[in-house]
Amino acid sequence: MNKPGCRAGRRAREKRRKKHEGVSEVTLTHEAQFVLLRRWLKEKGFASQSLIPVNFHDTGRGLMATQTIKAKDSVISLPEKCLLTTRTVLKSYMGDYIKRWHPPISPLLALCCFLISERYGGDASEWSSYINILPKTYTCPVYFSDDIVDLLPRSLQKKATEQKEQFQELYCSFLMFFHSLQPLFTQPTEELFTQDALRWAWCSINTRTVYMEHDQSDYLSREKDVYALAPYLDLLNHCPNVQVEAGFNKETCCYEVKSVQGCKRFQQAFINYGPHDNHRLLLEYGFVAPDNPHSVVYVDLGTLKLCLDEQDKQLTQKLLYLRDNDFLRNLTFGMNGPSWRLMTALRLLSLKPEQYTCWKSVLLGAVVSRDREEWCIHNALKLCNNLTDDNVKALERLSQLKQGANLSLLEQLCEVESLRQEEQRILEHTRVVLQNLWGQ
């Protein structure tokens, strides 16, 4: 699930992305957990005076630059000794247990088990200073109840359900391995390695690790080992408009993040996870980015069927051509209206029997006739209105559920609400674009 050079993930903006007028940033430097973290990192060779932890009113916890960072300058350089990787785990007290287990467990699971164990050890654990600043819960869909999953856009519901099923399968598949670790603990492993504990560790790794390739270990499965938890660095928040260069520098033996544009003094320093839309950000990182230039609204096959003429004798063949040419996925609306892929799919679906020989040119972007183009615009508007109605209903339901919700549930609902609001904004722009096209 990692993406090269951009994997310092984060829970759902921790304090929610709301603008609170009159609320200023609050430094966290003197809070006990951050004092201990910085002291612990200093012992490992890292000391940063140019970045301090701050609670920002719009993003929650993040890092503020205490001095100007010029373009191409280093934002942060974290020594390898500060990184928590599978190498750390295999050299630890848990290493022999992992090495003896067959078939080998995955790099991800090895890291999960180590995090759970270190959290259990409390202040006596070597990594406690880092564990203590990790979120206690996350807002990735794997934490969502089925009722909340049902409030996601239809195209995201399937992925969210798959994520939950994959996690459930992971947990059930390794109950025997968890039990094999019993000699390490006084508490029964079934009480320690619970589904909740594994979900917390799984999300900690999937949302917060940086991408770092490691040599394949004989003691782990063949899955790519590309994870590294990076204390302090992972406090950097994502901004889709920021450009950075990030990666492990073998010469300095540090994981480095360099700013392409620079950062002004007393402003929040950001990282960029990659050109991800809000569906992917919520699914993998547990948050939504307002005004995300990469965001779109997806048209799933169920919604697309609103345009299908069941009396069309060529319908089965049309859908077959669309599927075989990969035109039944990534059909979207953006700020500039319907995507080329969506309009191409609609054009093929619009073909009359006497026009069907044109299907190849249509898939290359050709416009068949004025009346068919009007049909496409009309049906694109129909799809847009259907998605808008779905959004309105979901937002009404979310508003109801937020009343009296506990903090954890409220954070989840707020992220889904943010996603729906962002999609509503895109659909409003799309409707204007389509109405203008219809009037031409």
Image: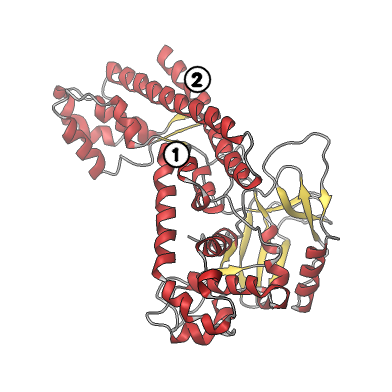
The circle drawn on residue 108 is none
Query: According to the image, label 1 marks what residue?
Result: 150
Q: Quadrant of residue 153?
A: top left
Q: Residues within 10 Å of mark 1 (few under 14, many from 20)?
A: some
Is residue 112 something that shows in the picture?
A: no
Picture residue at 59% right of the left edge, 64% below the top: 210
Question: Of the residues shown, which amino acid type is indicated by label 2?
Answer: Val
Which of the pair 273/122 is nearer the observer?
122
Whether pointer 1 and pointer 2 mark residues with C-beta atoms closer than 8 Å, the reply is: no
Query: According to the image, label 2 marks what residue?
Result: 432
User: Residue 269: horizontal and vertical position, in percent?
Assistant: 73, 53
Which of the pair 170/24 is nearer the observer?
170
Scheme by which the image is coloured: secondary structure
Q: Quadrant of residue 32?
A: bottom right
- In the depicted structure, whether residue 395 falls above or below residue 110: above
Is residue 186 something that shows in the picture?
A: yes
- In the depicted structure, whether residue 295 falls above or below residue 274: above
Secondary structure of the residue carrying numbered label 1: loop
User: Residue 77: horizontal and vertical position, in percent?
Assistant: 71, 68
- In the depicted structure, whether residue 291 falls above or below residue 97: above
Q: Is residue 87 left or right of residue 173?
A: right
- Mark 1 and mark 2 lie on one chain; the one further toward the N terminus is 1
User: Residue 207: horizontal and vertical position, in percent?
Assistant: 57, 58
Q: Residue furthest top?
A: 439
Q: Is residue 75 left or right of residue 246?
A: right
Question: Of the residues shown, which amino acid type is indicated by label 1?
Answer: Asp
Q: Please state, as top left, top right, bottom left or bottom right, where the C terminus lies in the image.
A: top left
Q: Real-space Cα distance between discs 1 and 2?
A: 28 Å
